[in-house]
Amino acid sequence: MSSSRERILAAARANKPALMSLPPPSDFGGDASLARFSEVLASIGGTVVRLAARSELAATVQQLFPAARLVASALLTPTLVVDQQTPTDVLADVDLAVLAGEFGVAENGAVWLPEAQMLHRALPTVTQHLALVLDQRQLVATMHQAYARLPAGPGGYGLFIAGPSKTADIEQSLVIGAHGARSLVVLVY
Amino acid sequence: MKVALFVPCYVDQFYPQVGIATLQLLGKLGITAAYPPGQTCCGQPLANSGCERDALPIYRHFVETFQDYDAVVVPSGSCVYHVRKHFDKLEQTPAVQRVRANTVDLIDFIVDKLGITTLPGAYPHKVGLHLSCHGQRGLHQANESEVTPVRDGHLRRLLAGLDGIELTELDRNDECCGFGGTFCVSEAAISGRMGHDRVQDHLRNGTQVLTGGDMSCLMHLQGIVRRQKLPMKVLHAVEILNGIS
Amino acid sequence: MSYRTHASRAEAFVLDHERTSWHDETLWFVRQKRDKAVYAVPEFQELRNLASAIKDHTLSQLDFYLEQFEAAALANGVRVHWAADAAEHNAIVLDIIRARGATRVVKSKSMLTEECHLNPYLIEHGLEVIDTDLGERIIQLRDEPPSHLVLPAIHLKKEDVGETFFKHLGTAEGLTDPQQLTEAARQHLRAKFLAGEVALTGVNFAIAETGSVVVCTNEGNADLGVNLAPVHIASMGIEKLIPRLQDLGVFTRLLARSATGQPVTTYTAHYTRPAEGREMHVIIVDNGRTKQLGRPDFRASLKCIRCGACMNTCPVYRRSGGHSYDFTVPGPIGSILSPNIDLKKHSTLPFASTLCGSCTDVCPVKIDIHTQLYKWRQIVAEANGLLVAKKLGMQFMGRLLASPAAFKLSGQLARRGLRLLPHALSHNQAVNAWAIARELPEPPKQSFRDWYAQQAPTPSA
Ligand code: SF4
C-alpha cells in the first residue's frame, strides 16, 4: 500500500475532532401523489403522459415519437437491439430509448433507473429522446423515502433522472438538451 | 433596574442627537439611563480589522465601565453583537458574563425587556427601513430573507404602529449596504457600489426617509445620499420614535 | 507585499458600471430562485441541521470512513489510489491514462482537478483534455479560470460566448442565441464524447458503506463521458465522504435547491462498479485537507458541498466577480479555504467581506463562514500580513480607545478638524478613501458627551 495512504489516514486520525454523533435517517413524510409528481416534472421540462393501460405503450410511443427511427427498448419491439456490447457508433444513432423506471419521486420529478433497465449504461444519456415507463403506484414523496427503497444499495450504476438534459451556462438562459436526452417523457400506467 | 447608556464613538462625535433621542425616549418610558462618562468604544473597528488582540484592553475597559449595570442600552445593534459574540476572547469572569448578557440593543430593550410593542406618535412619511446585518442576522432582530419570505421584526412593527407612516417594500429587503467597518475604506470601490445600489433600491421604491437601528450603516448611506444630492432624509429610528418634528 | 489585493482587482471590475449591474442581477436572480425553492420545503432548516450534523460526524470519524469506503470500493472492483497532494494526484491520473495508451480525455466538472491544475499538466504531457460541461468548455476555449463553483462562465455575456464559438467552433459570426450556441456545443462535444478514451469526473458524494461515488450534473455530461469511455477516473477530496446511502436523501434535497433553485439536479449518478470489461479508478486526495481538519476554528469549511449559494448571495462577490478572488474557489467559501493553502498570497481575501453573514445563512451545511472570515483576519494580522503602518495604527487606536481622556480629545480634534477643513481637502480621495463615493457626516457643534455634561445634575439611577 502506498505511503500516501498511511500518511493521509494518520493525519486524519491525528487531526480529527472528538466524536460527534450521527443523526438517524430521517423521513419527513410528504405528498407522494401523481399530481405533485406531474406538476414538478413539468416545471423542470419533462412531461407526464398517462397510459390507460400498459398495453397501450407501443401505440402511445408511436404517437408521441412518429419520427423516431431507431428505438431501443426492452418493453416494446425495438427497431434497434441494444445490449451491453453495443458499440459506441451504433449507440450514437439511437433516436429514442423506452426504459422501465423503478419508482418516481414526487418532490422533484426524478425517476430511479437502475442499471438492469438501461440495456447499456450509456443509453439513457446518449439517446436523443428518453421515455421512462412508470407504475403510478411506485411513487414516493421525497428523496429520503427514495433511498429507503434501495436497501441493497444503488447497484453497479444507477441514475435518478429528473427531466431532460439542460444547461443555463450561457447568461442563465435555460436551454433544454445540453448533452443528454433532449426530451424526457414519463409514461405512467 | 440600573440602566446605562452606551453611545458608540462615531455617534458621540457625529450624531449626538441620536444619543439625546435615546435618553429622552427611555425617559418617556420611565427609564432613567446613566451615561458613564469613562466609556469609549466596544473595540469592533480593531477586531474586524484583524487586530483583536489590540482590542482586548478596550474590551476590558468596556466591562469595567459597565459591570455594575443591569442593562447597557445601545442604539446600535452592531456594537451589541460585538460585545455579545466577540468578548468571548476575555476570561469569562462573572463581570464579563454579566456585561455580555446585559448589553442590549435599544429596540430589543424596549420590546423584549420593557414589553412595549407600540409607541404613540404620528409620522406621515414613506419610510425605508435598513437594518444592519449585525442586527438583522447577528442578533436576529428581524426575519432573514435567506430563511423565510415573511418580513418581520421589532423595529418594523414599532414603526408600522406610528400613525400615517408607510413602510417601503424593497426589491432586496435585507441586502447589506456595504459599510462593513474598515471595509468601507479598504474596499472603497465595492463598498461605494453596494451603498449606491442600496440607496437606489430605496429611491426606486419611494423612500422619503431612510432609517434604521445602526448609525454606522446610515452614516455610509447618508454620505451617498448627500454626495448624489438625492431627495432622501436619513435618520436613526430612535429619532423617529422619539417624535422628531 | 508583492501580491495584488482583492480590492484592486475588484476596483477594476466595478469600473464598468453597467456590466457590474448585470453581473449582480444575474446572480441575484439565482439567489431568488434558491429562495423560492427553499421556502417551498417546510423542513429545509431541519435538513440543514441534519446535513451539518452528518458532515460533523463524518469528519470526526474520517479515518474510519476513508478505510470503510476503500474496502467497499475495492470489493466492488474499483481501483483506489491515494494522493497526498496535487502533484501526486496528477501523476496518478497520467499513469492510468498512459497505461491504457490513451490520448483523448473527456472531463466533467471537478473543482478538485481545477485546484490541482490537472488540465495544463495533462496537456503538457501531450494529451487532449476536453472539458465537457458547457460552461467549462466555454472558459477552456477562452483559456480562463472558472469564476464560480457551479456557473463557471457566469462572468460572460452571450456575446462573449458567441465570439468564442465563432472563433473556435465555426459558428456564424454574431450568433448570440443561447439555444443555438448550446446546440453548436452539443454537436462539437458529442464527437468528443464518442471518441473519449478516458473519462475524468469529480465526486459530489462518496458513500462509505457502499463504496459508491455520486456525481450530480444537469447536462448529463459526466454520464455520457463515463459510460462511453473504457476508463473512468473519479477524483475526490477526502471530505466528500458521507457514511450511508440513506444520508444522500438529505444532501440531494439540499444541493440543487441551494445551488440553482432546482428541486434536484437532472442526473444524480451512482457509480459503484465498473461495467464489464471496463476500469473504474477513484483517487482520494488530501492536498491540505487534513491540515485544515486540524484547525478547530476552520475545519468546518471541509463540510462544503460546493453548491455556490454563498457566492450568489454575497454582495461583494456579485459586484467584484469570481476572478477578483484569484483562487480556484471564489467567493466567501474560497476566502476561508484559500488562506489554508497560501496565507500570504490570499491574505486580503478574508477582508473582502462586510461580514454581513448572508453566506452563513444560506449555507446548506451551516458552515459559519463569516465567523471564519473574522478569525482568518486575526491570523493574517498576526502573521503581519497587514501593512505594518496599518498595524501600528491599530495598536495606537487600541491604546486610544482604552483611555477615556485620550479618546475624548481625539474625537474633539477629529470633529473640529472636519469643521475647519475645506471640503476639497477633507474629501481628497487620495488620502480619504471614504470620500470616493460618499460625503463625510456634517460635524455637529457639540458631541453627545459634551451635551450630556451640560445637562442638569444627572440622577445616576
Ligand atoms: S460554503 Fe456552503 S454555501 Fe458555500 S458553496 Fe460550500 S456548501 Fe455552498
Image: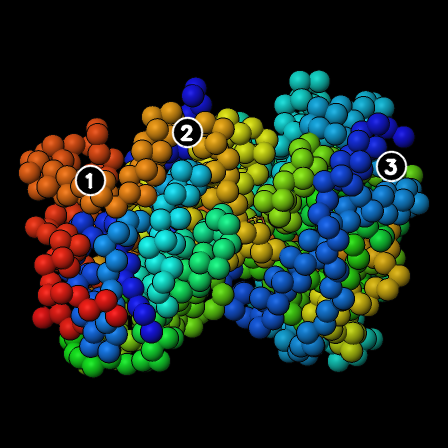
Q: Is residue A154 above or below residue C459?
A: above
Q: Secondary structure at mark 3?
A: strand
Q: Chain of mark 1?
A: C
Q: Amino acid at mark 3?
A: Arg
Q: Which mark is residue C79?
A: 3
Q: Which residue is mark 1?
A: C410
| 2 and 3 marks on the same chain | yes
Q: Chain of mark 2?
A: C
Q: Which mark is residue C386?
A: 2
Q: Quadrant of the C terminus of chain A?
A: bottom right
Q: Amino acid at mark 2?
A: Leu
Of C130 and C112, nearer the camera is: C112
Locate residue C240, reporting x and y percent: 71, 46
Q: Nearer the viewer, mark 2 or mark 1?
A: 1
Relative to C6, A45 lies left or right: right
Q: How many marks?
A: 3
Mark 1 and mark 3 lie on one chain; the one further toward the N terminus is 3
Residue shown at the point (80%, 36%) measured from the top left: A10
What colouring does the structure picture have? Answer: rainbow
**Real-space Cα distance between discs 2 and 1?**
24 Å
Of B154 and B177, nearer the camera is: B154
Q: Amino acid at mark 1?
A: Ser
